Structure formats: C-alpha cells, structure tokens
Image: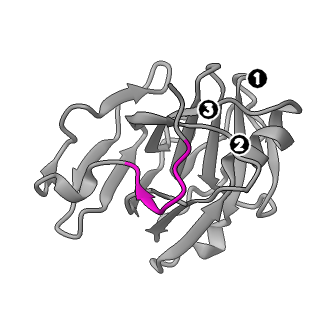
Amino acid sequence: MIHVWLAVQTLTNLALISPGRGVPPPWLLTRAPRAELPAFRVTREHTLEIEASGTGGTAIYRLRRSLAPSEQGAALSWRWRTSTPVAGARLRDPARDDAPALVVVAFDDGRTLAYTWGNGEPIGDVFLSPHAGRRAVVVCRRSEDANGSWYLESHDPFADYRRAFGNAPHPIVAVGMGAETDRLGGHTLADVSDLSWD
C-alpha cells in the first residue's frame, strides 16, 4: 500500500543513532564503481559527517513507507555545510563529476535524483548524469557557498522528477547522503542533517 504523509516527517533514524563512526542497519552503504567508500560518522548533533578522500559512495536509508506523488506539492528539506569544495569539478563531465556532498532520492522505478553541491554550475540546473540516464542531477550549491555555513534546502522531488525525466513521477522508496571525490582525488568533509518531508 502507498501512503501519502501530510504532516512534517523525519525520514531516517539519525536522531536515534549513538554518535560514532559508520551507520548501523537498516542503512546500506553503496560505493561508486571502482571506488572505496567515504567515511561516515554520526555526530553528537545527529548529523551525518561524510569524509571523502579519493572515494565515492552513499549511505542509503530505505523508507518504512513509500511517499506517493501528490498534487498538493511536497517538500524534502535538510541542512548541510562544507568548507571543502572540489577544485576543478564539472558535474556534466564524466571524468570530473565530483561533489563534496549530495542527497539522493530513489524512486520505485529505479530512477534517482542526486541533489548535489556543485562547483561552477548554475543553482537549479537539472540534467541527466553523464554516467547513467536513470540518474538526474539537481544543482543546489556552488563552490563559493562552501564556507562552513549551514544552508537550508527545500525541494519538491516529484516536480524535479518531471523536469529531469519528462514523465509522471513514481513513489519515493529511499533517501541517502554521500560524497564523490573518486574522479579527481580530492579531500572533502561535509555535514548533512536528517531529511524531513512535508
């Protein structure tokens, strides 16, 4: 059964995890092809710290209940920060598409959106990944925003799905957080808060 949530909901269990390295089940770690995983650590503030040094991957949390498309509009919100942009990154270039932080939304048809901390790309730019046509990139921040300040994001994944893939969106089944520096070999450190839905 597909459920529509109308109140603000926290989507993962970060607030319940004891601070420390790694993430416990039901989180799953997925690595970029031919890359080692970044280091994940739950902080005392219950954010997820992601440290990447020539590595790439995502911590994925499968939702207990899927989120169905709604005509009323919806918002996925989170806070994040970094002070380590990836010099020379170009998200449209498959040889340089590194990012210090990204938030992933997975749909039940196998497509994904990657809300990404970019470099020089325009904020709000949406395009298909140079590696996979079933993954789309949404640029949220630029390199000059990587000053250690917290930024609040709020996006409608269903509207972004329509923009990226050109058809009606499917239910959301999982969310995740990660970083990728496996192309250019840089070192990044970022914090991402829990994800909320309203």
Left or right: 39 as drawn, with respect to 74? left
Left or right: 7 as drawn, with respect to 25? right
Looking at the rendered image, the disc whose residue lies closer to the viewer, 1 or 3, is 3
Q: Pointer 3: what residue?
A: 171
**Could you tell me which quadrant the C terminus lies in?**
bottom right
Per the image, label 3 sits on a secondary structure element best described as loop
Left or right: 150 as drawn, with respect to 89? left
Per the image, label 2 sits on a secondary structure element best described as strand
Residue type pointed to by label 3: Pro
Residue type pointed to by label 1: Gly
User: Is residue 90 something that shows in the picture?
Assistant: no
Residue at 86% x, 30% y is 167
Cα distance in 3D space between marks 2 and 3: 18 Å
The x, y position of residue 139, in whole percent, is 71, 55
Q: Pointer 1: what residue?
A: 133
Task: Sort mark 3 into few (<14), some (14-19) or many (20+) by Cα contacts within 10 Å.
Answer: many
Q: Pointer 2: what residue?
A: 137
**Along the viewing direction, whichever of 89 and 30 lies nearer the viewer:** 30
Residue type pointed to by label 2: Val
Per the image, label 1 sits on a secondary structure element best described as loop
Magenta stretch, residue numbers: 4-11
Residue 7 sits above or below residue 33 on the image: below
Residue at 62% x, 65% y is 154
